[in-house]
Amino acid sequence: MGFSVVKCQVDGSAIYGSNSSQLHEVRTYKEGKLKIAGLIQHDQEGLEKAGNIRNAWIGVSSLIALFILEHNAICDALKKEYPNLDDENLYRHARLVTSAVMAKIHTIDWTVQLLKTDTLLAGMRGNW
């Protein structure tokens, strides 16, 4: 459980996939957005298509769905502000912003709450 939450928040592979075929599966190729219907897509084995989370639970799936929706909302905001951006550029910029948000949450919020020490708090803030 803990590994999946960290993976979701740190490298984004739970959202964007761990390889090019997973990445292809999760993209709509329209306005930079990711596929989402309900929570997230699952393959025939019941595993989430975005990433390879074998120990997922509803809390992790909800976080992943939330970040997919955030990615898509960022695409909408970018498209409104920069109407000439194509699908690939919208996708890449939204992925960069979403990854930064996940890194911030992991560094400033999650890790500090997990290991509540003043030294860790100072280190995480310095790292960020």
Image (cartoon, grey):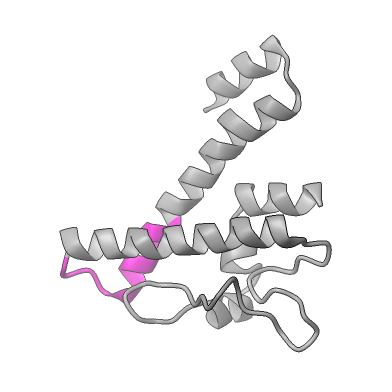
Q: Is residue 89 magenta?
A: yes
Q: Is residue 76 left or right of residue 108?
A: left
Residue 115 is situated, as x and y percent measured from the top left of the image, at 76, 24
Residue 16 is situated, as x and y percent measured from the top left of the image, at 56, 66
Residue 1 visible? The answer is yes
Seen at 71% across and 50% down, the residue is 5
Which quadrant of the figure has residue 41?
A: bottom right
Q: Is residue 17 left or right of residue 83?
A: right
Seen at 39% across and 65% down, the residue is 72
Q: Residue furthest bottom?
A: 44
Count the numbered circles shown: 0
Q: Which residues are magenta?
A: 83-95
Which quadrant of the figure has residue 38?
A: bottom right
Q: Is residue 117 left or right of residue 107?
A: right
Seen at 65% across and 54% down, the residue is 8
Q: Is residue 93 magenta?
A: yes
Q: Is residue 76 left or right of residue 38?
A: left
Picture layout, residue 1 above or below residue 22: above
Residue 33 is situated, as x and y percent measured from the top left of the image, at 40, 72
Q: Residue furthest top?
A: 118
Seen at 62% across and 77% down, the residue is 22
Picture layout, residue 72 above or below residue 12: below
Main secondary structure along the magenta-highlighted residues: helix
Picture layout, residue 79 above or below residue 119: below
Residue 2 is situated, as x and y percent measured from the top left of the image, at 79, 47
Residue 13 visible? The answer is no
